[in-house]
Image (tube, rainbow, N blue to C red):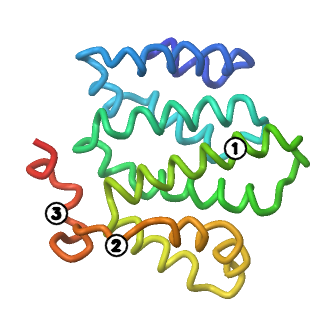
């Protein structure tokens, strides 16, 4: 993890993310240790700042695969993950690099997968964040272009009635 964390800061980040993706997909018994390591923080930092589509998509896919592996340990990172989602939703709307259609399609599928993962695992926290973040007038365009169509595709999650934000991130829920 130390080597991977250092490599994420270098020019070899795409190769590092590819290797990390292979490790995460194999689901080793020790993968839970990533939550206590700086590697997860570096991955989230990369997702918050990266503008190149290949490392961004690789990091996004690693995060999507990693979330259900360590659900009880991810509570302290939820706000950062939600900020990543908002950044990617805004990036999707603005399309700063004028991505080719096929890259944009892959990006949208990755964003949609992250949305479903977050809504499925942490619906109370996620909807609370969306309500707070997109209640401002300046974010209304992003909400109506990207997030509202995603919300229209899901049904009401039962945890919205039976759980709270605190219970959803509790260790007892994920045992």
Q: In the visual, does 151 lie left or right of 28?
A: right
Quarter of the image with the C terminus is top left
Q: Nearer the viewer, mark 2 or mark 1?
A: 2
Instruction: Tell which of 151 and 27 is nearer to you.
Output: 151
Instruction: Tell which of 126 and 79 is nearer to you.
Output: 126
Q: Residue at x 57, y 52 (%)?
A: 112
> What's the CA distance linking mark 1 and mark 3?
32 Å
Q: Give x and y (percent) for residue 71.
A: 27, 43
Q: In the visual, does 10 lie left or right of 150?
A: right
- Residue indicated by mark 3: 167
What secondary structure is found at the residue carrying circle 1?
A: helix
Q: Nearer the viewer, mark 2 or mark 3?
A: 2
- Residue indicated by mark 1: 107
Quarter of the image with the N terminus is top left
The image quarter containing residue 16 is: top right
Q: Indicate whether 110 appears above or below 141.
A: above
Q: Give x and y (percent) for residue 161.
A: 21, 77
What secondary structure is found at the residue carrying circle 3?
A: helix
Instruction: Tell which of 161 and 54 is nearer to you.
Output: 161
């Amino acid at each position: 993890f130390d080597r991977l964390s250092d490599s994420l800061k270098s020019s070899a980040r795409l190769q590092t993310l590819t290797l990390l993706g292979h490790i995460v997909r194999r689901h080793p018994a020790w993968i839970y240790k990533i939550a206590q390591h700086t590697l997860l923080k570096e991955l989230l930092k990369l997702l918050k700042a990266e503008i190149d589509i290949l490392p961004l998509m690789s990091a996004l896919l690693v995060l999507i695969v990693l979330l259900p592996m360590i659900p009880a340990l991810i509570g302290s990172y939820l706000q950062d993950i939600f900020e990543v989602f908002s950044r990617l939703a805004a990036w999707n709307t603005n399309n700063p690099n004028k991505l080719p259609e096929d890259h944009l399609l892959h990006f949208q599928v990755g964003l949609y997968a992250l949305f479903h993962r977050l809504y499925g695992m942490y619906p109370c926290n996620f909807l609370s964040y969306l309500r707070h973040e997109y209640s401002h007038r300046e974010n209304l365009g992003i909400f109506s272009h990207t997030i509202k169509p995603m919300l229209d595709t899901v049904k009401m999650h039962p945890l919205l009635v039976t759980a709270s934000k605190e219970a959803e991130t509790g260790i007892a829920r994920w045992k």
